[in-house]
């Protein structure tokens, strides 16, 4: 009789807990079956592939809570349990299950705790000689205000245990922090608030890797197109990074390996970094599958969750993917991924899909709290075209000509002039509200001033409704009330006008439009590159 392995899924799908974890669970089932194991799936969502009656050898449709999981383990007496493919939900059961002498396959609970516990993680970062943004933990409102003042604004604040970045916020001043502490969270010794120095204008990176305790293989280094502060589940990302040097990418890979080995990771690990003023900072480490595993797997042509599962049941990476090590030893690996041979200069861009139209009152702005409900992917040899394809897939048709409305928060104004100038040089007409209009005028960039909603009519919202605006770039000021900017963004959503709420996304749009125009001028067409053709499957 074959050995049994229980896989814990992610529980009910909701905003902040993606379907991507289901992909990892299904691949784990397939890998176990390939190796002759009996795969037992535990999950409680009828809309997942992992709960299809013919996916696993045995399915328990049960909630992912300790009592139910233990009942199943006592009944089935499995060889081991896999926690790392269902996201944060099953990971929380690691210590309770270990106390019941359950064989947890992969990274052990004490090492999971090292990554999850802030103090233990801080000590590890110091021991390894790595950098981390300054931070503090507040057990009451007074402590929170004091820590924020010491760190200096802006700061990132969040409750201690969050899923999908729920209730996280970037706070720019003391008044905003007071409002957050009074309205968004309850602070206590049992439920402290975590406060981090926010590295404004940094570039955020995600890394997915597999470790077998001896070797670490980097699946991919992904550069977020939106600047740091946008939840990784909501940010468009590029493989390979499109603005960073090879030296920075190699340093990020080195630090990932160091962290994986120090945490004695077995299986998957996800690390989030920020590059700030040329320095690499570690933001957080997740010793589990991340929501980017499907995207990375499709980009590199290797199923990371399958590879990780084979590692969990005792195989080494050198046994599972020997050809990858051969390429690495010959110096043929791509800088952003240990799996890609050098010379495959392909950009994969992930773009996310939002449910804004179903939530008519919600401000469609990006931040630390995850709001997306799906994602799409564009691939091309040119970054601009890959990003363009991703936008088309997400439902946005970028304009080749026409009118662009630009209105940005004061802190973003210095970064917008070059972008506006480039759009003007491409032949676009620029429209802006008073503050941004004055800035563009000062820099000699032709623009037309348009009224805000609160200033009278005809205003920018009227222009969007009338079809006179073809692209919106509007960054939030941080204020939460229904401002003029809120009505601009909501109207853009309602009338399906492409709109972007970060300056970095604006620059990516510029590259996409330039690349698409160049393609049209050469009388070529936008090619569809299938994943099968890309990886020779």
Image: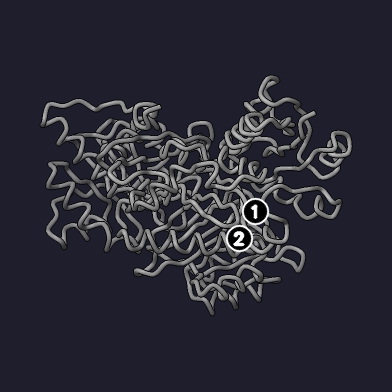
Residue found 38% across the figure and 60% down from its top: 250
Crowdedness near tag 1: few (<14), some (14–19) or many (≥20) residues, C-alpha within 10 Å: few
Q: Is residue 463 visible?
A: no
CB under 8 Å between discs 1 and 2: yes
Please give the label number shown on residue 476.
Answer: none
The picture quadrant where one finds residue 108 is bottom right
Q: Nearer the viewer, residue 157 or 61?
A: 61
| Residue 347, percent from left and from top | 32, 41
Horizontal side, residue 67 vs residue 175: left or right? right
For the residue labelled by badge 2, is the local secondary structure a helix, a strand or a loop?
A: strand
Q: CA distance from mark 1 to mark 2?
A: 8 Å
Q: Looking at the image, can residue 505 be seen?
A: yes
Q: Residue at x 46, y 39 (%)?
A: 295
Q: Residues within 10 Å of mark 2 (few under 14, many from 20)?
A: many
Residue sitting at x 50%, y 64%: 282
Secondary-structure class at tag 1: loop
**Residue 468: x and y, percent?**
24, 34
Which quarter shows the N terminus?
top right
The dot on residue 162 is 1
Q: Nearer the viewer, residue 28 or 512?
A: 28
Which residue is most to the top? 54
The answer to which image quadrant residue 27 occupies is top right
- Percent from the top left, x then y, of residue 160? 67, 61
Looking at the rendered image, the quarter that the C terminus falls into is top left
Q: Residue 158: which disc?
A: 2
In x, y percent, where is residue 249?
A: 37, 58
Which residue appears at 54% of the width and 41% of the height?
320
């Amino acid at each position: 009789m074959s050995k049994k392995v229980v896989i814990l899924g992610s529980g009910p799908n909701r905003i902040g807990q993606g379907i991507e974890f289901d992909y990892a669970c299904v691949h784990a089932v397939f890998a176990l079956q390939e190796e002759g194991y009996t795969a037992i799936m535990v999950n409680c969502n009828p809309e997942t592939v992992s709960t299809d009656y013919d996916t696993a050898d045995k399915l328990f449709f049960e909630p992912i809570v300790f009592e139910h999981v233990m009942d199943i383990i006592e009944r089935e007496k499995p060889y081991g349990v896999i926690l790392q493919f269902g996201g944060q939900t099953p990971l929380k059961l690691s210590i309770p299950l270990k106390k019941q002498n359950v064989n947890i396959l992969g990274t052990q609970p004490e090492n999971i705790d090292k990554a999850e516990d802030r103090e233990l993680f801080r000590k590890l970062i110091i021991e390894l000689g790595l950098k981390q943004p300054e931070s503090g933990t507040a057990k009451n409102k007074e402590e929170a205000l004091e820590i924020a003042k010491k760190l200096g604004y802006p700061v990132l604040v969040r409750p201690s245990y969050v899923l999908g970045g729920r209730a996280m916020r970037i706070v720019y001043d003391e008044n905003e922090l007071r409002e957050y502490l009074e309205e968004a969270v309850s602070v206590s010794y049992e439920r402290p608030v975590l406060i981090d120095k926010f590295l404004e204008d940094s570039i955020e990176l995600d890394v997915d890797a597999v470790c077998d305790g001896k070797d670490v293989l980097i699946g991919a280094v992904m550069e977020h197109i939106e600047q740091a502060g946008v939840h990784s589940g909501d940010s468009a990302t590029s493989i390979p990074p499109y603005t960073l040097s090879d030296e920075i990418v190699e340093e990020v890979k080195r630090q990932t390996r160091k962290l994986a080995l120090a945490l004695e990771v077995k299986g998957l690990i996800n690390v989030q970094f920020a590059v700030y003023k040329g320095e690499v900072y570690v933001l957080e480490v997740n010793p589990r599958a991340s929501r980017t595993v499907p995207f990375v797997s499709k980009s590199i042509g290797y199923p990371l969750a399958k590879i990780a599962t084979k590692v969990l049941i005792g195989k080494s990476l050198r046994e599972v993917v020997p050809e990858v090590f051969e390429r690495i030893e010959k110096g043929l690996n791509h800088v952003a991924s240990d799996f890609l041979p050098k010379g495959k200069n392909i950009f994969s861009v992930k773009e996310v899909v939002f449910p804004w139209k179903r939530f008519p009152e919600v401000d469609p702005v990006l931040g630390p709290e995850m709001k997306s409900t799906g994602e799409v992917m564009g691939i091309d040899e040119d970054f601009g075209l890959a990003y363009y394809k991703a936008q088309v897939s997400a439902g946005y048709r970028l304009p080749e000509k026409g009118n662009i409305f630009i209105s940005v928060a004061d802190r973003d104004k210095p970064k917008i002039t070059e972008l506006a100038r480039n759009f003007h040089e491409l032949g676009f007409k620029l429209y802006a509200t008073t503050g941004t209009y004055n800035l563009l005028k000062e820099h000699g960039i032709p623009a037309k001033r348009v009224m805000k909603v609160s200033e009278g009519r005809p205003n920018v919202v009227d222009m969007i409704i009338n079809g006179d605006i073809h692209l919106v770039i509007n960054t939030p000021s941080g204020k939460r009330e229904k401002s003029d900017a809120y009505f601009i963004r909501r109207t853009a959503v309602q009338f399906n006008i492409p709109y972007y709420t970060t300056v970095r996304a604006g620059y990516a749009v510029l590259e996409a439009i330039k690349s698409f125009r160049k393609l049209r001028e050469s009388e070529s067409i936008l090619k569809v590159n299938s994943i099968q053709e890309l990886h020779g499957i």
